[in-house]
Image (spheres, rainbow, N blue to C red):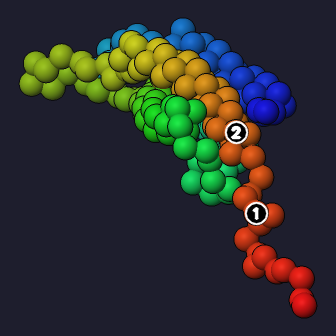
Amino acid sequence: MSSIIVQVSAFVLNLIAFGLAVAAEQRRNKATVTPDLAKEYDYYVYDSDVATGYGVGALLLTAAQVVVMLASRCFCCGRGLKPGGSRACALMLFLFSWLTFLVAAACLLAGSVRNAYHTRYRGIFNGDPLSCETLRKGVFAAGAAFTFFTAILSEFYYISYSQSRDAAGDTPYGGSSIGMGPYN
């Protein structure tokens, strides 16, 4: 039977990570071009940098993934699973949950780093227009979407893993020791 504590803690961590990723998308940096007092050059004024913190906070997704992987012994360690549909399903969900986790973590980390990058001063030289470097819209949203997919896949993985583990039962023949008969 799968542990309710593991499922609830992973769900709560994934829910917080999803909420922070959505908040980071809503609070991305926006920049405005402002001339200096002497009108010699232009510079950028960025609004709050809260989205970077939200994006880093959304990496609570890592904690949720660690909780599920420790509870299931990362699928490869621990006692054997019963061959069958539950084990095959658990294997596929394991692989896809790690794939979506890596994509979500990459989006959130790259979005946080890119959002923290600020160009300071740029004058107009040789007629080149100013380039305002900001994070593209949708990076944190993609991270939030993959966080959602990771949450679903990891929950189903843990349930499927638990079903296969419970179906395997105890080790056969009383364990791995040598069976001894009575001495006559």
Q: Which quadrant holds the C terminus? A: bottom right
Residue occupying the far front of the picture: 184
> In the image, residue 112 lies at what x, y percent?
50, 30
Q: Is residue 91 above or below residue 29?
A: below
| Pick the front one: 144 or 10 | 10
Mark number, residue 21 = none
Q: Where's residue 179, x and y in %?
A: 78, 76
| Residue found 43% across the figure and 18% down from its top | 142
Picture quarter containing residue 40? top left
Q: Earlier in the sequence, mark 2 or mark 1?
A: 2
Which part of the image, by quadrant, shows the N terminus? Answer: top right
Residue at the image position 57 percent from the left and 13 percent from the top: 22
In the rendered structure, which amino acid carries the disc numbered 1? Answer: Tyr
Instruction: Residue 158: tell me if it is visible.
Output: no
Looking at the picture, does residue 69 appear above or below residue 138?
below
Quadrant of res 111: top left
